[in-house]
Image (tube, rainbow, N blue to C red):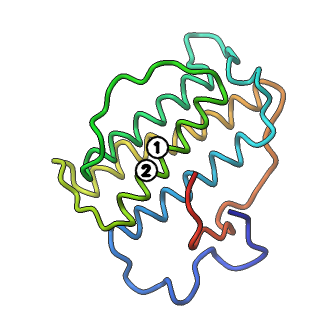
Amino acid sequence: MKAREGGFGMKAAEDAEPSADALLRHYLRALSFRLEHVLASADAAFGDFDAGQGARTPSEIVRHLSGLIVFVGEQYGGPSRAALPALGWQAERDRFRTQLRALEALLGAGAARRGPLSAFQLWQGPLADAMTHVGQLALLRRLAGAPSAPVRYWQADLAGDEPG
């Protein structure tokens, strides 16, 4: 996924009333784009950065992000969530990408929501939480002395790209 030079990130053909699942898939692409941007060029030591005061490390945050995506996937009949073991920095990032692709595959195959949460509850709960944690990672990059480059997220062309 890349940032587009102009426009608002939505094509005219996309501005009809999209389904909740289409919006969810777009949101997952936006989440993926933002996370990949924030973590681009982050060195291996960043995964263990300690901001103090009991804050989660970046590796712990990415593990939590994976858990959130697995939870959303469960609502669509994906595998049941189990406690995710702690992995190294790159392995945490890889696991997140894998979980995101698995959720995208479920949605792309037209899986119906089976869990008790509505689409609205998924957005206001685990998905909003996930985007908040991407912001935390951006802040931790700055605190670690290696801020991510500025980007106009609204210009990202997310159409057709696979998240993760």
**Looking at the image, which residue is at 22% across and 57% down?**
113
Q: Residue at x 28, y 44 (%)?
A: 74
Residue at image point 57% right, 17% down: 55
Q: Could you tell whether 129 is left or right of 117 in the image?
A: right
Secondary structure under the numbered disc 2 in the rendered image:
helix
Q: Nearer the viewer, residue 128 or 88?
A: 88
Which of the 4 image quarters holds residue 162? Answer: bottom right
- In the rendered image, residue 163, in percent from the top left (x then y), is placed at 55, 56
The CA distance from mark 1 to mark 2 is 5 Å
Q: Amino acid at mark 2?
A: Ala
Residue at point 71% right, 48% down?
Answer: 37
Q: Is residue 51 left or right of residue 99?
A: right
Whether pointer 1 and pointer 2 mark residues with C-beta atoms closer than 8 Å, the reply is yes
Q: Quadrant of the N terminus?
A: bottom right
Q: How many marks?
A: 2
Few, some or many residues within 10 Å of mark 2 (<14, 14–19, 20+): some
Image disc number at residue 55: none
Quadrant of res 139: top right
* Residue marked by disc 2: 102
Mark 1 falls on what kind of element?
helix
Crowding near the residue tagged with mark 1, few <14, some 14–19, many ≥20 C-alpha atoms within 10 Å = many
Outermost residue, top side: 53
Q: x%, y% of residue 46?
A: 74, 24
Q: Name the spot of residue 99 as percent of width and height, x first.
A: 46, 43
Q: Quadrant of residue 89?
A: top right
Q: The residue under label 1 is which amino acid type?
A: Gln
Q: Which residue is mark 1?
A: 99
**13 relative to 41 in the view: left or right:** left
Q: Is residue 33 above or below residue 66?
A: below
